[in-house]
Each structure stands twice: as structure tokens, then as C-alpha cells.
């Protein structure tokens, strides 16, 4: 059995490397990002992963804490993962890419994203083996967790890598990197630090990751070769005609921000969330769902958690749509701010009443906010 699990870990390691190489080939950057450079990024990611893994194992070993296998490590272990080790790992990945930045080898957003993904591929390959060799993960469920953890490495590294190669790097790199590090830590905590039933909470995040990958590949497919000046053509990243529509959605057109609609919108969002949660509980009881199982560590917690999570996620676009329609808004600014305020209130309540649930709520919040922006856009006054 240990040999079977070792082979499984090795296979997951190969999958991580293969995916990163596949992204590099599909991105059509081989003229600027040659094989030697790509291999160097993979090796750098692997080396930093070995350092981080050994350090994490040493810290948890001397402290006696345990954050994996159903969340028995407690809130202190979760804090170490989210606030310490996740930023450390993302910082090491950024350090691996930074020499390319210093040498001017990150000429575009796509190039930055692909180089970060290559580093993440080497990092994920070593970590997949480390879960078996160092942490002793030998069950099929832990192999499943390791597989689900792989997309997080690529997505969050690719997100700040995209910003790293952009013209607004000095302005947005630090906040985007901090956000990606915290979200990656939250993602890992849900995957490894909670019961199997909590894995349903990462489904919306996986969908968002797939959409981000699709956009990166679409940009690569429609991109033109680099010009002689070393810059990509105007069609390499996205259709420039889309910029106007995006600006129209968020632009205030000289109008002041309607603070009272932000306050009312936050109350509406909270009310809709409560209504949808009540509806989920009612439907669950009608079909025989036992919500007491939500605290269990096994797969039996998936149905009640999934039902409640789906209700919360659905509440965001519905409430944002109602706020946009009621306020007659021409931009998503007020509905977006009201959704953000409601999320902050919910997180504050969780931090007092149920600290562990705070980490789970942080994982849902970004997807909920994005859905709220979509709902607000559908409810805008046009014409």
C-alpha cells in the first residue's frame, strides 16, 4: 500500500510539472521564454518548495500542532497556514521570478503569468511528493486533497504574475500579491485542514480558476507575434474595444457616490442572505438533510455544507441585482460597495462567534463578490 501511495504522489508531481510545461507551450512565448529559462524557473520553484516544506514540517514538529487531516490543528494552526506559511510560499515564488523582472524578461502580463505558473509547477511537484514523504499522507482521501490543491498553486501565482508583467506593476503588485497569498492560504486550509465535506466549498473557486485559465489560453490563441520593439501587439491580450464597456460600468460619469444606497444595499444583502439561508434550511429539512452533520469530518458533511454554501453564493447576485434596480444605478459601484460592506459585517460576526468559520467565509467571499458584480451589471439602468 505505501508503494501505491508513493506512485500516486509521484504521478501528481508529474501532473504538476506537465501542466506548467503545457501552459508554457500553449502561451506561445518560446521566442522570448526559451527552454533554458523555463527549466530554470521550474528548478527554482522546486528548490524553494523544498525549503518551505522542510521549514513548515520543522515548525509543526517542534510545536506539536497539526493542521491537516480534518482540521484537528485548531485555530492557531490555521493562522500559521494562512498568515505565515502561505505568504512565505508565495514570497518564494515571487523571488524566483524577480530576476526575470530585473533583467527585463517580463514584457507583458501574459509573460508574467506564464513565468509564475512555471515556478508554481516546480513548487507543486515537490510539495506533492512531500505530502507523502514528510507528512505521511497515505490515504486515498489525502491523495484527493493533494490533487485539488494543485490548481491553487497555478491560479494564485498566475494572478499576481499577470500583474507583475503589467504597466501598473508598481501600483497593484503588492496588494494583489497579498490578496493571492491570503486566499491561497485559505484555499489550502479548506482543502487540507477541514473535513472531506468541506471540499464542496472549493468548487466555486475551482470554477473561477478554470475561467481564468481559459482567458489566458484565449489570449494566447489570438495573440500576434511580438513586434520588433519587444512589445505585444494591441490584439495580444484582449480586444481593445472592450475597455470602453468596462469603464462605462464602473465610471461615475462625474456623479457623487451615493453613500445611502451603499448602506441600504448592505442591509438588503444581509437580509437576502438570511432569507436564502432560511430557504436552504427549509428545503434541506424537506428532503431529509441533517444539518447537524455539518460539523463532521467525513463526506457526510458535504450535503448540508454544499446546500448552505450554494444559498449564500446565490444570495450575492440576487441582492446586488435588487440594489441596482432599486437605485437606478448606471454603474456597479454602489452595489459592489454594499456587497463588500455586507461581507465585512459577516466576517466580523464570524470572527467573534465562530473563528474557524471565518477562514471558510474568506474562501467564499471573493467568488460571492464577483457574482454580486455580475448581478449588479444585469440590473443596471441602460440607455
Image (cartoon, grey):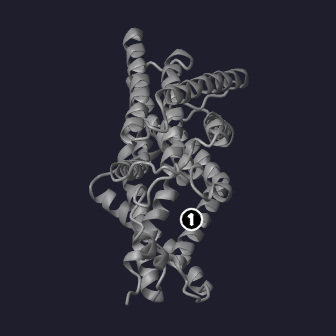
56 above or below 167? above
Decide if residue 356 is in sight here. no
Question: Horizontal placement of 231 versus 263: left or right?
Answer: left
Q: Is residue 61 visible?
A: yes
Give the x, y percent position of residue 12.
40, 25
Q: Name the residue located 46 percent from the left edge and 85 percent from the top edge.
A: 330
Question: Which residue is depicted at the point 59% across and 32% down?
Answer: 67
Q: Nearer the viewer, residue 257 or 47?
A: 47
Q: Quadrant of the C terminus?
A: bottom left
| Residue at 37% from the left image edge and 34% from the top image edge | 22
> Which of the two residues, 94 or 81, is positioned nearer the viewer here?
94
Q: Residue furthest right?
A: 62
Q: Secondary structure at mark 1?
A: helix
Residue that badge 1 annotates: 343
Quadrant location of the N terminus in the rendered image: top left
> Which of the 4 quarters of the picture holds residue 170?
bottom right
Residue 334 is situated, as x and y percent measured from the top left of the image, at 54, 79
Amino acid at each position: 500500500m505505501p508503494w501505491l501511495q508513493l506512485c500516486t504522489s509521484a504521478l501528481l508531481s508529474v501532473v504538476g510539472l506537465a501542466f506548467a510545461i503545457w501552459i508554457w507551450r500553449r502561451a506561445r512565448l518560446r521566442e522570448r521564454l526559451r527552454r533554458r529559462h523555463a527549466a530554470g524557473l521550474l528548478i527554482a520553484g522546486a528548490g524553494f518548495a523544498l525549503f518551505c516544506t522542510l521549514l513548515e514540517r520543522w515548525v509543526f514538529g517542534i510545536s506539536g500542532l497539526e493542521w491537516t487531516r480534518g482540521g484537528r490543528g485548531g485555530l492557531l494552526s490555521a493562522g500559521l497556514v494562512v498568515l505565515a506559511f502561505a505568504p512565505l510560499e508565495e514570497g518564494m515564488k515571487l523571488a524566483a521570478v524577480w530576476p526575470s523582472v530585473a533583467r527585463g524578461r517580463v514584457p507583458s502580463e501574459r509573460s508574467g503569468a506564464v513565468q509564475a505558473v512555471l515556478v508554481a509547477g516546480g513548487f507543486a511537484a515537490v510539495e506533492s511528493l512531500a505530502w507523502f514523504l514528510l507528512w505521511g499522507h497515505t490515504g486515498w482521501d489525502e491523495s484527493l486533497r493533494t490533487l485539488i490543491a494543485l490548481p491553487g498553486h497555478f491560479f494564485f501565482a498566475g494572478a499576481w504574475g499577470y500583474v507583475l508583467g503589467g504597466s501598473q506593476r508598481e501600483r497593484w503588485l503588492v496588494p494583489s500579491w497579498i490578496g493571492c497569498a491570503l486566499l491561497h492560504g485559505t484555499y489550502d486550509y479548506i482543502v487540507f485542514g477541514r473535513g472531506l465535506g468541506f471540499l464542496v466549498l472549493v468548487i466555486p473557486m475551482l470554477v473561477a480558476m478554470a475561467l481564468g485559465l481559459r482567458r489566458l489560453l484565449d489570449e494566447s490563441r489570438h495573440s500576434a507575434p511580438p513586434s520588433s520593439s519587444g512589445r505585444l501587439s494591441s490584439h495580444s491580450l484582449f480586444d481593445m474595444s472592450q475597455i470602453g464597456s468596462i469603464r462605462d460600468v464602473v465610471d461615475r460619469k462625474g456623479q457623487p457616490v451615493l453613500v445611502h444606497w451603499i448602506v441600504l444595499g448592505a442591509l438588503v444583502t444581509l437580509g437576502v442572505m438570511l432569507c436564502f439561508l432560511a430557504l436552504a434550511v427549509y428545503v434541506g429539512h424537506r428532503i431529509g438533510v441533517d444539518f447537524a452533520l455539518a460539523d463532521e469530518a467525513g463526506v457526510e458533511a458535504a450535503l448540508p455544507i454544499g446546500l448552505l454554501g450554494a444559498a449564500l453564493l446565490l444570495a450575492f447576485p440576487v441582492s446586488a441585482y435588487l440594489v441596482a434596480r432599486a437605485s437606478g444605478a448606471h454603474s456597479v459601484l454602489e452595489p459592489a460597495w454594499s456587497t463588500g460592506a455586507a461581507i465585512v459585517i459577516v466576517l466580523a460576526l464570524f470572527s467573534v462567534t465562530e473563528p474557524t468559520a471565518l477562514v471558510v467565509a474568506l474562501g467564499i467571499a471573493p467568488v460571492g463578490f464577483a457574482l454580486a458584480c455580475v448581478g449588479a451589471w444585469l440590473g443596471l439602468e441602460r440607455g
